Image (cartoon, helix red, strand yellow):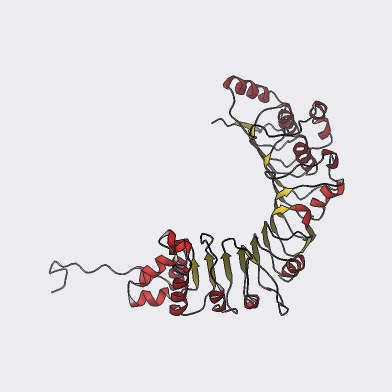
Amino acid sequence: MSPDEQGLSLPSPDRLSNLNIHLIDDILSRLSFRDVVRVSTLSKDWEYICWRIPHVKFDQTVWKTPEDLMSPTIGFIPILDSFLRLHRGIILKVTLNIISLIVCPDVDRLIFSLDTDHLQHFVLKLPFTYPPYRLPNLFFNCSALRNLYLKECEIQLPCFFKGFNKLIRIILKSVTLSFDTFESLISNCPLLEDLVLKDIENPYFMSINAPKLRSFVFRGDIQLIHLESVPVLSNVLYAPRELVLENEDDFVNIFSSIPSLECFSWDHFEVDNGSTKLIPTRLPSDLNCLKCLFMSSITLGEFFELSFALCIIRSSPNLEEIESKECILSDGDYFECVPQEVVDEILASFSDITFNHLRTVKFYYVLFEDVEMQLIKVLLAKSPALVKMVIKPRQMETNKSLNVLVEITKFQRASSKAEVMYLVD
């Protein structure tokens, strides 16, 4: 008699165990190390599967108490030792995120255990220490490396370093290295496509030669970076700490070395403004490839920042999208107001320019001062392909909002399809 005939129910099948091994690896790679250990206790089969996964992630989730964070010998070291003792197989991806630790433990034992012929993805996020942790020379033998993320450490290239020939992405945050080490590292990554540099500890000039670089993010002193050879670089995000302009060429040089620039983002939040006299009305050579312009933490009512924005817009005839998020100033913030004669000349300064490809414009947190209204008027009048303009004001009186909206609806529009969307909280 079958179990069904006896009124018995069969145990449900283990569907997870029947999944493709690559799918199981992908699922396990998304779990914390603590959860992977828990899964390994389910059965002998799962123990084998868990201890051979090619992706390993250590982060704060492996510590139970605040005391573990205080002393790495309590939490991190035993966990790492257990992993190194039990793991079997090749490790392709390692993530070590221990920024929550009060002290930086010795992570050399993890790096020394890696198979430098197979490691493809390495993330190392350490707590701040002085002096910073220095990557061991062995790490620079990782010939298969494709993605590298380093935070709070020091790089010194060994004499035998021949490059990361397969590396396509580098993220360096609060990393200490000399200018020659930086230039040697970048130039010896021939396939590099994506580069992120934030708060690099190096006070010297750094050149970038990267023939395949397509995306570049930089936060720091923009005067220390020179894009010497980046022929296909198309996506750039700058968040400069300061912008010291000694002459007009300093501003022009920011853009002259990026011939393929398609998307430019500028975060003006931490910039110490320079002299408006050093910003040209228009760049010597147009940014003909530029399609998307994003400006955040900018104050269009400030003379320098308006001059910056107008110069880029005038120099980009093929723009398709413009987005501006204005900075919300605190009481006591000082800025140089835009002279009225400059405001009055905005419309005339665009007399020979038409934005035939501009389809979307977004203004956020505007005050509807004269300068902002003039820029809105220009873009409506000079954009025959415009489809949508989004305007979101800061909090303001309802009556004033309605009056401004009525005024904007009366502005001349070059596009019959242009829709003005007015967003109010």
Q: Nearer the viewer, residue 176 or 229?
A: 176
Residue 41 falls left or right of residue 20: left
Check the picture and name the quadrant holding the C terminus: top right
Report the residue at 75% width, 59% height from top.
Answer: 203
Vertical placement of residue 411 versus 147, above or below? above
Residue 63 visible:
yes
Q: Quadrant of the N terminus?
A: bottom left
Along the line of sight, which residue is nearer the eye, 415 or 51? 51
Q: Position of residue 192 (x, y in %)?
A: 69, 66
Asked where in the image residue 355 lies, by quadrant, the reply is top right
Q: Quadrant of residue 389?
A: top right
Determine which quarter of the picture holds residue 336.
top right
Res 31 visible: no
Nearer to us in this view, 407 or 94: 94
Q: Position of residue 35 (x, y in %)?
A: 40, 65
| Relative vertical location of residue 365 with respect to residue 65 in this rendering, above or below | above
Residue 42 picture location, percent across and down: 33, 71
From the top left corner, tell me how far across and down residue 298 is, in percent: 69, 39
**In the image, what residue occupies the spot 56% across and 61% down?**
127
Which of these two is toward me, 175 or 372?
175
Number of labels in the image equals 0
